[in-house]
Image (spheres, rainbow, N blue to C red):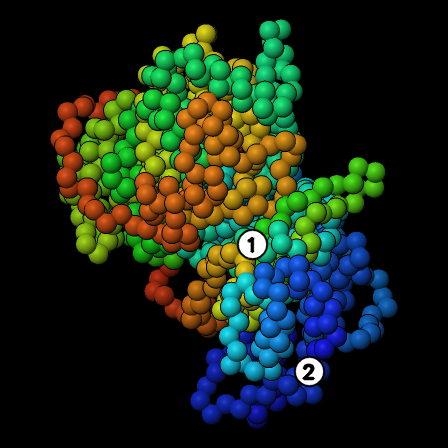
Amino acid sequence: MCLVEVEKSPKPVASCAMPALPGMKIKTNTPVAKKAREGVMEFLLMNHPLDCPICDQGGECDLQDQSMAFGADRGRFTEMKRSVVDKNLGPLVKTVMTRCIQCTRCVRFASEVAGVQDLGMLGRGSGEEIGTYVEKLMTSELSGNVIDICPVGALTSKPFAFKARNWELKGTETIDVTDAVGSNIRVDSRGPEVMRIVPRLNEDINEEWISDKTRFCYDGLKRQRLNDPMIRGTDGRFKAVTWRDALAVVAEVLQQVKPEEITGVAGKLSDAESMMALKDFVNKMGSDKVLCEGNGPSPPADLRSNYLMNTSIAGLEKADVFLLVGTQPRVEAAMVNARIRKTVRATQAKVAYIGPPTDFNYDHEHLGTGPQTLVEIAEGRHPFCSTLQSAKNPVIIAGAGLFDREDQDALFSTIETVAKKFNVVRPDWNGLNVLLLHAAQAAALDLGLVANPTESIKSTKFLYLMGADDVDLDKVPDDAFVVYQGHHGDKAVYRANVILPSSAFSEKEGTYENTEGCTQWTIPAVPTVGDARDDWKILRALSEVAGAQLPYDSLSGVRDRISMVAPNLVHVDEREPCTISSEVKPPVKQQVSSTPFKTVVENFYMTDAITRASKIMAQCSATLLKK
Amino acid sequence: MAAPLRRSLPSLGRTLLSPSPAPARMLSAAASDALVEIKPGEIGMVSGIPEEHLRRKVVIYSPARTASQQGSGKVGRWKINFVSTQKWENPLMGWTSTGDPYANVGEAGLTFDSADSAKAFAEKHGWDYVVRKRHTPLLKAKSYAENFKWRGPPKAEQA
Ligand code: SF4
Ligand code: FES
């Protein structure tokens, strides 16, 4: 398609591979060029089956476009078309290999971006085919992207196969909340149902890829949903009630407990609006015990630079040495890992890792498993110090899993010592990063949801769980009254006394801040299920019934309130870096313990209520995580 | 021009507070003579839009390229998303119904060349809008010949 006619050249020239030279006369629209393109198109279609009507790519197929633009109006091929056996690439990617036009984009993506050497080209001539050589599943956390990459329908989405045609779908441009990266996505829906999720370009965050968890978690949005407000009766069973009754019951219990016994916990998928409302409500009831799960016993909320990715995700590309402390980016934030890998490939940057043995898809040096190694580096006794010393733009990435450790303060001050020693933070370069795990974390720290979970939950009589499923429910006292507000019947529902159904991220407008401090909005794509309401609206209604009315009753009202607490959360699509340096910290007296770092994310495919409810994610964990 | 204007006239009495037919004259004048200024929300009021849809929240955005296609013909246009989720499925046939007259307008009916013209349109109709940033690809200079360039003796292969 790129063939052009160049004056004085006997043959048409492939413009994509020919550098333009001075004095060259190029003609792009002559009969010669057109005929040459038609010929190429004919060769491409020679072995391509005529099954567009039953092909999932039909309607958004590059080959269809090209043949419309450049192809002939009839075919001259009367022989048998070649056919190829389909390959089994796992539960996500469906193959119809007869459609393959051997462009090898999937092979290049797998080996260059995803970093797995699974796909390759076998045979030659008309026997050429894409495959895995021996029967093998594609075990990359980015494998779904080959569906987009493939210009024809050879690689398509298995869960989406024959579910809808793409021209019936309505696209809503929103963001993903299954990890802290905030990948830009488009939610394609048909009627009231989410049919698929595809990536959308954002060079600063996810480039044009998304992880498999983001892409395929959508079937979790239809399963295990909470439809109606429910109250647990004396027989231990839930009974559906009206909103009025449910709120009245909660408000009545609220009147009976002491203010300091009230605890509010925000879940990992909460948006900033609902966390603001939760905090205001709990504070109004006279308690200051509001927290967000995953932020550990003493969240480092004083300075934004202590919990953000200060280098920014795109900024990682400028780094030449990475030191990963207790973080496994491949499972914690697949898109950040893809960025690191891109840097390693492009500039031969060095990666060193301290933590439990884990999978990397680039060269790395495993320095050790525990904080001891970190202390050695801080004291300059470790051989890796020389590499750090000579680095121009060193980057340290600490995992958010460190927040849960007892010796958190000591660890972070050690990391800071390392940073100071090797010039990681300079006026023109900030290489000190924290990689967060959940979509809600950054905004929660901005808004000040920072109570100590162990203490507040142990002594509570009234526990308000806003989508929080990973709190330690054994610690909750037996006589505590637990309200669960959320969209999925997940772990915490077993302990709940009252259930208030809320809407999921695909159904509401919400503000999320990602791990680099970029504020983004979700936009509702589909209606909520049953009687569910937006999180902040439920809290607003409850506050009125409980006699402590919150002073806002519209989304813009909540956002105004947020702008007073954390102004950066209202500047959408902008990354607000932290400007204050961390120099002004009190000295830490804690000792670094010698317990090795733990793996934080055990199962990449199932990390929250939505992904745990998803059947596709369950299949993935069953087949792909098998060792 | 005259026919649609006449059709919108009966609704004028209902939607406009001032009883005089002056706004109608202004509308026809606005079409032919740009000197007459259109105030925010005015077009919405005279166009017979039901009152509850006069103040709507809309999102102005520029759709990203479809992930599976490389063609750029449709990139760079601006659309209005009416954030319409009032939908339900007909329990008998499975058809989708909606209670929102704008449900299908944004996606199918309105396309603008620039964010500004979309903004002006929303303003004229009195909608509350937010404009979302458009993301464009970062283009890097690359050349095919570069792939075959001599870069010194081979280093240890990168995975
Ligand atoms: S991307 Fe699709 S068409 Fe290209 S080689 Fe791979 S399977 Fe074949
Ligand atoms: S685009 Fe030039 S050879 Fe294919």
Which mark is on residue A342?
none
Query: Residue A84: where, in percent of width, then height?
Result: 74, 53
User: Could one spot residue A603 in this view of the protein?
Assistant: no
Q: Please give the name of the residue rendered at 23% of the width and 49% of the height, measured from the top-left corner.
A: A579
Residue type indicated by callout 2: Lys
Q: Which mark is residue A34?
A: 2
Q: Residue at x 54, y 74 (%)?
A: A16
Looking at the image, residue A564 sits to the left or right of residue A239; the answer is left
Q: Between residues A242 and A374, which one lies in front from this camera angle?
A: A242
Residue B55 percent location from the top left of the image? 56, 54
Q: CA distance from mark 1 to mark 2?
A: 52 Å
| Residue A145 in sight here | yes
- Residue A274 left/right relative to A528: left
Q: Residue at x 68, y 70 (%)?
A: A66
Mark 1 residue element: loop
The quarter of the picture where the C terminus of chain A appears is top right
**Which mark, by number, is residue B55?**
1
User: Residue B88's image quarter?
Assistant: top right
- Residue B31 in percent (x, y) is at 61, 78
